[in-house]
Image (tube, helix red, strand yellow):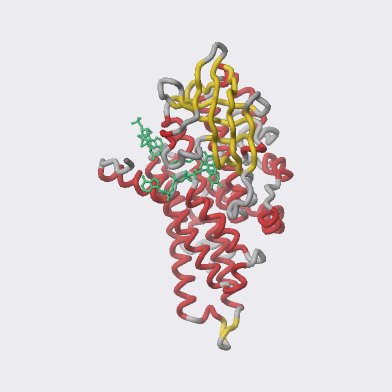
């Protein structure tokens, strides 16, 4: 058994020395700086903002960006980092996903030079935080039905509406917000903290992703200057392009959470004695462990192949849907199975599985539920749209 950090099919052989080094750097950091306090952050519902400068120092923001101080690394390296971060906690990986995929990516892809110069260096250096507002109370899986409006005024636009379940919302300096213009087109805007009529408040009483800030954003006649329109973002497709970036990171991150659960369960099963034998010696427990490891191995292979396709520019959004859908839902099953193997101890935050299990309920839902990704793949292979 190749443990720690399970690699049954020697996937390590598929990585370059640079990729391994980047992964190991993130791995060591998580072990030293995050895992010792992971349960506390979760229990207390804290996102550790004090770790942001260290993450910036490691080049975790603007990870794939070749300019503006970014690290300029490939997709496989980014995936490996997401895997290690989520071995720590899904909330931590979420923070890094949002900054890279949902804030830096849209500003870099759809923004003006002025917008890029203003925001990218500070986002990359961790001095500014961003969020991404697409989901609304009445529009989740179907963002096309959003109600937030952007009416034209003399200097730009006036935004009205509400966004819900927004990661980083109440700690963000800038929000990438999607709203409908009077002609029904969805456009992207940079809404800044402190703009009159814009407010963000945290969502409390979450039982999942507790070590992550999740917020409601309110827009009450917010005057957004023309300069804050992302000119290249036109239509829902532009928002969906950002989601592809984030979903890719989630596919890898889910593997990290699953590995953490599997390794905890394996080690526990070897040392827990019942009926005068380690529970790992019982066939039913071995079945659970064998199935967990099989799913982890399949998920790792999906990720590496997807990463290579993405680096070659050949990954389609439905390829990403398949990996996000499979890996998030299998990781959730693995977490539930690990929790079961731990018996009563499985419900204690003293062990990682219950924390990952609760987090993975969100990971399975956000960035497109399992159903939505199944339908996207179904549409791709049949040519028939089952969404409406
Ligand atoms: P539909 O007609 O399918 O699409 C409109 C246009 O977009 C194209 N398209 C995509 N393009 C790029 N990437 C994708 N993933 C794309 N999916 C579709 C499509 O081909 C079409 O192009 P064109 O040229 O023909 O105009 O639009 P629809 O209204 O039927 O909706 C499609 C659907 C349901 C798949 C989409 O709306 C969807 O993905 N819904 C799920 C919503 C979702 O994932 N929300 C996530 C919010 S952000 C978040 O959760 C952040 S979590 C924080 C973290 O990551 O940690
Ligand atoms: P709904 O769309 O109401 O779905 C409810 C159920 O109906 C699901 O099981 C779904 O699969 C099913 N369903 C819906 N349509 C169909 C269909 N056509 N066929 C079959 N079944 C269907 N959003 C952001 O914009 N930015 C963020 O930063 C962000 N962060 C988040 C953080 C957390 C902790 C959470 C929990 C969510 C976050 N989200 C964010 C929102 C997330 O993307 C949405 O919750 C998700 O897209 C699902 O939308 P919904 O919750 O409205 O569920």
Does 94 appear above or below 146?
A: below
The residue at the far top in this view is 154
Residue 338 in the image: x percent, y percent?
53, 67
Does 143 appear above or below 188?
A: below
- Give the residue at x 42% y 54%: 326
- Give the residue at x 54% y 72%: 341
Residue 290 in the image: x percent, y percent?
46, 70
Residue 101 in the image: x percent, y percent?
53, 37
Answer with the quadrant where ligand 1 appears in the image. top left
- Give the residue at x 69% y 49%: 46
Residue 31, image quadrant: bottom right
Residue 257 in the image: x percent, y percent?
55, 57
Does 224 appear above or below 171?
A: above
Residue 38, image quadrant: bottom right
The residue at the far bottom in this view is 276
The answer, for residue 124, to whether it is visible in the render is no
Q: In this rendered view, identify the residue nearer to me: 78 or 97.
A: 97
Q: In the drawing, does residue 336 fall left or right of residue 210?
A: left
């Amino acid at each position: 058994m190749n443990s720690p950090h399970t690699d049954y099919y020697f996937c390590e052989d598929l990585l370059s020395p640079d990729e391994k080094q980047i992964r190991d750097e993130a791995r060591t950091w998580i072990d030293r700086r995050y895992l010792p306090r992971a349960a506390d952050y979760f229990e207390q519902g804290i996102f550790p903002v004090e770790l942001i400068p260290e993450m910036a120092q490691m080049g975790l923001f603007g990870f794939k960006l070749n300019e503006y101080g970014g690290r300029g690394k490939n997709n496989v390296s980014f995936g490996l980092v997401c895997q290690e971060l989520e071995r720590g906690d899904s909330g931590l990986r979420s923070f890094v996903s949002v900054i890279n995929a949902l804030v830096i990516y849209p500003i870099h892809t759809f923004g003006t030079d002025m917008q890029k110069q203003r925001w990218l260096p500070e986002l990359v250096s961790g001095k500014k935080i961003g969020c991404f507002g697409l989901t609304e109370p009445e529009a989740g899986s179907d963002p096309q039905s959003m109600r937030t409006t952007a009416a034209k005024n003399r200097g730009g636009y006036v935004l009205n509406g509400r966004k819900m379940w927004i990661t980083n919302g109440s700690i963000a300096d800038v929000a990438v917000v999607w709203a409908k213009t009077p002609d029904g087109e969805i456009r992207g805007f940079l809404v800044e903290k402190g703009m009159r009529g814009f407010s963000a408040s945290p969502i409390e009483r979450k039982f999942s992703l507790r070590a992550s800030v999740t917020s409601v954003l309110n827009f009450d006649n917010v005057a957004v200057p023309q300069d804050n329109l992302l000119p290249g973002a036109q239509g829902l497709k532009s928002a969906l392009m950002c989601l592809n970036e984030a979903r890719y990171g989630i596919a890898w991150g889910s593997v990290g959470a699953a590995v953490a659960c599997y390794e905890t369960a394996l080690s526990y099963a070897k040392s827990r004695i019942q009926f005068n034998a380690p529970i790992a010696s019982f066939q039913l427990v071995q079945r659970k462990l064998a199935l967990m490891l099989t799913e982890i191995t399949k998920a790792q292979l999906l990720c590496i192949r997807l990463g290579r396709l993405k680096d070659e520019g050949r990954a389609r959004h439905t390829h990403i849907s398949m990996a996000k859908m499979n890996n998030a839902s299998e990781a959730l099953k693995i977490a539930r199975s690990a929790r079961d193997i731990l018996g009563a101890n499985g419900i204690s935050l003293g062990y990682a599985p219950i924390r990952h299990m609760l987090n993975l309920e969100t990971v399975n839902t956000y960035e497109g539920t399992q159903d939505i990704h199944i339908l996207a793949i179904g549409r791709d292979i049949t040519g028939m749209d089952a969404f409406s």
